[in-house]
Structure formats: structure tokens, C-alpha cells
Amino acid sequence: MKNSHFTRQERHIILWLRFLTFSFLVVGLVFAFQPNYFLQYLDSVGLVFFNFQSHSLGHPQFEIWWILTLSAMGAMTYAAFQAQSDWLRYHLLVPVIIVSKAIAAFGFLAVIVFYPTHFFYIVAFVVDALLCLTTIYAYAQAIQSRSYSRLQ
């Protein structure tokens, strides 16, 4: 078996990173080709289940924020892919994903508090916070399962 020399915790983080790679790639592609479709769907879920009224999004504008979003999703996809493909060599890319998801979660929390106009901000906060916390837990378990001081 290819991953037989890894600890159980390292195999778990590798599996988690494969999930993140796929998720970041899919979300990046959705925002690349249909930036408002998924956001409008989430707003409609908030309306149906929670009676959360949201403003209309209007037409997407492919400007600086769209480009920055795609570049961030691309960088996180790359980091997750590299870390899962060669865990021992690239495990230090995982904190990049953790920091990125933490910043995104705090950003969405600030938007929820100061500008609560869309239900998808709440969904994005919950998802990013869960991704961050799960990645922190899996990474800490994997790092503790092996002595990395000999590898660096």
C-alpha cells in the first residue's frame, strides 16, 4: 500500500487534504464561471428556511475581487494538493490553508456583524470556521504522531 509508512493520523490528514483539494477546485470553478448562481441559491435557502431577506446581487462584475478570489482558491487548491501528494515534504503548506480559512472566517463574521445583507455570509462563516477548525485538529494530530524535527 502506498501510504503504509504513514501514521494513522497522517493518513487522515492526507484524506482530508484530498477533500479540500477537490472542494477548493470545485468552488473556484463555480465562482469562475457562475459567480452569482450559488450565492443566490444560498440566499434562497435562507429565505425559505429562516425567512432571511437578502438584497439582489445584480450582475457579476469581473474585476479585482473576482480575480483575487480565484487566485486565492487556486493557491489553496495547490497547497492542499501538494501537501497531500507528498506529506513529509510539503506538510508545512497546511498552515497556509489554516491561516487563509481563519482570515476568511473572521472576515465573514465581521461582515455578518456590520453588514448583514446576505444569508450566504452566514453560511460562508460557518463553512470556513469548520474547515479551519477541522484542519487545525487534523494537522495537530498528524504532527504529534511523528517527530518532524528529524525531517527538516
Image (cartoon, rainbow, N blue to C red):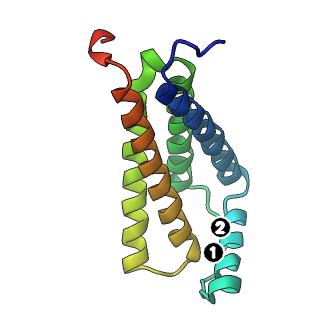
Q: Amino acid at mark 2?
A: Leu
Front residue (pair 132, 27): 132
Residue 133 image point, x, y percent: 42, 51
- Disc 2 element: helix
Which residue appears farthest toward the left when viewing the image? Answer: 149
Residue at screen point 50% across, 64% down:
126
Q: Residue at x 59, y 32 (%)?
A: 15
Q: Amino acid at mark 1?
A: Leu
State whether residue 41 is above or below residue 24: below
> For mark 2, what is the residue?
39
Q: Nearer the viewer, residue 15 or 111?
A: 15
Q: Which labelled disc corresponds to residue 98?
A: none
Q: Secondary structure at mark 1?
A: loop
* Residue carrying label 1: 57
Q: Position of residue 54 (x, y in %)?
A: 60, 83
Residue 111 lies, with reference to residue 148, above or below; the image says below
